Image (cartoon, rainbow, N blue to C red):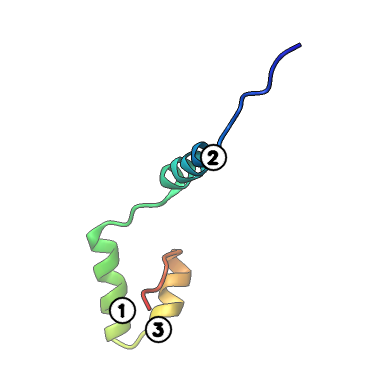
Amino acid sequence: MSKKPVTTKVEVDQAVKDIRRATCKVHSAEEKIRIVLAELCGEDCIAELCRRDRQAAAR
């Protein structure tokens, strides 16, 4: 019989954080500036621009 590995809540939380960190998209400064300039020019609202570029809108 094989034993199941004993995992603690801390180990599980760390594994989830590692997965999220590995799959998180990093946006360059140029992309962020482009989004802000597009909003300032009145093309779209920040929420729409962020949805289009899959970024979280700052609150």
Residue to which mark 1 is pinned:
38
Label 1, secondary structure: give it.
helix
The first of marks 1 and 3 along the sequence is: 1
| Circle 3: element type | loop
Tags 1 and 3 touching, CB below 8 Å:
yes
Q: Quadrant of the C terminus?
A: bottom left
- Image coordinates of residue 28 in percent, x first then y, are 27, 56
Query: Which residue extends farthest right?
Result: 1
Mark 3 — residue? 44
Give the quadrant of residue 6.
top right
Q: Residue furthest top?
A: 1
* Residue ID at (41%, 46%): 21
Which residue occupies 47% across, 47% down?
A: 20
Residue type highlighted by circle 1: Ala
Indicate the amino acid at tag 2: Val
Q: Within 10 angstroms of label 2, few (less than 14), some, or many (20 or more) residues?
A: few
In front: label 3 or label 2: 2
